[in-house]
Image (spheres, rainbow, N blue to C red):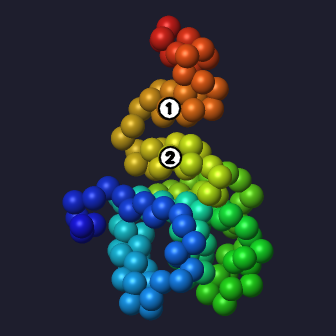
Amino acid sequence: MTEDNTDGLILIGEKTWRSQSFETNYTIIELVKKFKNNPNKVVGAICDAAYFLATNGLLNDCKHTVNIFAEIKDNENYTNSENFVKAESVIDGKIVTARGDSPVHFVKNVMKALGDIPEKNINFFFNMYTIGFEKKAFEKYSNE
């Protein structure tokens, strides 16, 4: 995979983000930097992947969230506490972060960040998983 043929880089959560080898961390950090430096590419991180980005200084230039702010606030590589947002998911330009308990909010913001998905479709997806497909979402969007 190269950043040339990919619209976004999505890092999923898991505790393994805290125990990878130096080589693996370095490779991922460099890849994230390439995507972040391209204004047309999305970088998304949920759960401990957001922790990984924060503790490697990769969220020091944008609004963001993580599972537990106390885990990152004193990290020597993290210098952006003023832009921490206590929310399910945060989108700042092409950077999307989310808590691990908020996958639907995360996907909604990733779709927004991609920029080529109609708002109606994004809202339908979100409502289908938050208010239910059979009743509310279907009724709301079948008449448009």
How far from the left and from the top, in percent, is residue 34? 35, 74
46 horizontally vs 43: left or right: right
Where 65 sits versus 116, above or below? below
Regarding residue 132, the answer to whether it shows in the image is yes
Residue shown at 66% from the left, 90% from the top: 76
Query: Looking at the picture, which amino acid does disc 2 mark?
Result: Val
Regarding residue 26, the answer to whether it shows in the image is no
Where 13 sits versus 61, above or below? above
For label 1, the residue is: 125
Q: Residues within 10 Å of mark 1 (few under 14, many from 20)?
A: some
> Which badge, 2 or 1, comes first in the chain's sequence?
2
79 horizontally vs 43: left or right: right
68 horizontally vs 103: left or right: right
**Direction right: furthest residue:** 70
Name the mark on residue 70: none
Query: Looking at the picture, which amino acid does disc 1 mark?
Result: Phe
Are dots 2 and 1 in contact, CB under 8 Å?
yes
Q: Residues within 10 Å of mark 2 (few under 14, many from 20)?
A: many
How far from the left and from the top, in percent, is residue 82? 74, 71
| Separation (CA) of disc 2 from disc 1 | 9 Å
Residue shown at 73% from the left, 67% from the top: 68
Residue shown at 74% from the left, 70% from the top: 69
How far from the left and from the top, in percent, is residue 52? 55, 75
29 and 91: which is toward the camera: 29
For label 2, the residue is: 107
How far from the left and from the top, in percent, is residue 125? 50, 32
Quadrant of the rendering where the N terminus is positioned: bottom left
Query: Which quadrant would residue 126 be assigned to in this image?
Result: top right
Residue shown at 64% from the left, 58% from the top: 99
